[in-house]
Image (cartoon, rainbow, N blue to C red):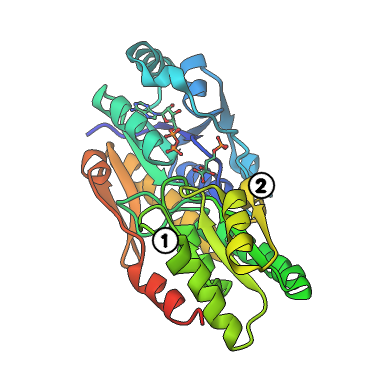
Amino acid sequence: MNQVKTIGVLTSGGDAPGMNAAIRAVVRAGIGKGMRVLGIRRGYNGLINGDMVEMNLRSVSDILQKGGTVLYTARCLEFKEEAGIEKAKQTCIEAGLDGVVVIGGDGSFRGARDLSLRGIPCVGIPGTIDNDIASSDYTIGYDTAMNTVVENVDRLRDTSQSHDRCSVVEVMGRGAGHIAVNTGLACGAIAILIPEIPFDVDRDIVAKIKASQKTGKQHFIVMVAEGVGHSHELAQEIEEKTGVESRATVLGHIQRGGSPTLRDRVIASEMGYYAVELLKKGVGNRVVVTKDGKVTDYDILEALSMKKSVDMNLLKIAQDIAL
Ligand code: ADP
Ligand code: F6P
């Protein structure tokens, strides 16, 4: 079996807090195990253009606590084409890369699969605030993003309470409602709207607001996943139908930034270390995941075929106690 000597690491897709902790773990674990580690800049663009830098132990000093990604990230359209993948493969061969760690989402994993199938062993690490990677219970950045939401909704609650208003808050998550369900529960939302579950404004919001007004409730938070959208129109509809003055806030990219939480730093470090161990053994075409609290790995194709649903029990609890 070939001993892996040089590995690369890249971040791809939307940045997520904790990506730097994962990069640091890959670099330190790789060098600690006697390998060279190259940092590939701007996702798959760096592989296509040969934009790489040799990392040393100090290249990753002082980044553990930082959001974003020091390697930059991109959504590289060229890499979706055959010619782009071939160029990337040639760069890997020329740079003597024996493996690549790809930190990103499902799209990034598809790229990792394509490169692995062409003989460059790749290992994926789930990095996205959305937690929408089916194969893994957890994705790097999710905890930090949700804590950012909670911190900001607590501020909105102060002003909602002062004006007896309804705050419609739109959170990220792409097509998934994981962030909305958890933060909706944590922020005491009267209603949580996610793309996975059909809803009725009159039944699920207006009737709930009116019922709780009768027991003295005067201000309200409605959590909306971006996959549902239309938050401003929804706020207007709520105001018209309930008489409660309503405002919409789209939290947006603020959810992607900031210092990673303990949970994100620990999982990112574990996953980065695990990915290097796989490449050290010459194993590629895998994704590192968490399953029932443990870090493990799956074949990329198998991982990409999996399905994940929102935590319906959490949603039910949130709805049952939103009175
Ligand atoms: P994420 O990784 O956050 O899911 P994207 O879906 O945009 O974000 O994917 C990031 C990058 O992964 C894309 O810009 C592209 O470079 C690569 N990628 C996505 N889908 C594919 C694919 N089907 N084949 C090859 N590469 C892909
Ligand atoms: O995947 C992370 C994410 O922030 C999603 O929640 C959101 O839909 C998307 O990326 C936003 O992408 P962009 O950075 O291109 O605006």
Residue 260 is at least partly visible in this image: no
* Image spot of residue 196 (x, y percent): 36, 54
Secondary structure beneath label 2: loop
- Identify the residue under disc 2: 61
Q: Residue furthest bottom?
A: 215
* Image spot of residue 234 (x, y percent): 57, 54
Residue 81 is at least partly visible in this image: yes
Write the residue at 58% across / 57% down: 237
Establish if 78 lies above or below 156: above
Quadrant location of residue 41? top right
Which mark lies nearer to you, 2 or 1?
1
Question: Could you say which is closer to the camera, residue 144 or residue 245?
Answer: 245
Quadrant location of residue 158? bottom right
CB at mark 1 closer than 8 A to ligand 2?
Answer: no
* Image spot of residue 267 (x, y percent): 46, 59
Quadrant holding the N terminus: top left
Write the residue at 59% across / 49% down: 233
Q: Ligand 1: give its quadrant.
A: top left
* Image spot of residue 251 (x, y percent): 64, 52
> What's the CA distance linking mark 2 and mark 1?
51 Å
* Label of residue 260 in the image: none
Write the residue at 35% across / 58% down: 197
Establish if 42 lies above or below 35: above
Residue contact at pointers 2 and 1, CB within 8 angstroms: no
Secondary structure beneath label 1: loop
How packed mark 2 is, by other alpha carbons closer than 10 Å (few <14, some 14-19, many 20 or more), is: few
Establish if 211 lies above or below 196: below
* Label of residue 200 in the image: 1
Question: Could you say which is closer to the camera, residue 80 or residue 37?
Answer: 80
How packed mark 1 is, by other alpha carbons closer than 10 Å (few <14, some 14-19, many 20 or more), is: few
Which of the marked residues, 2 or 1, is nearer the chain's N terminus? 2
Q: Amino acid at mark 1?
A: Asp
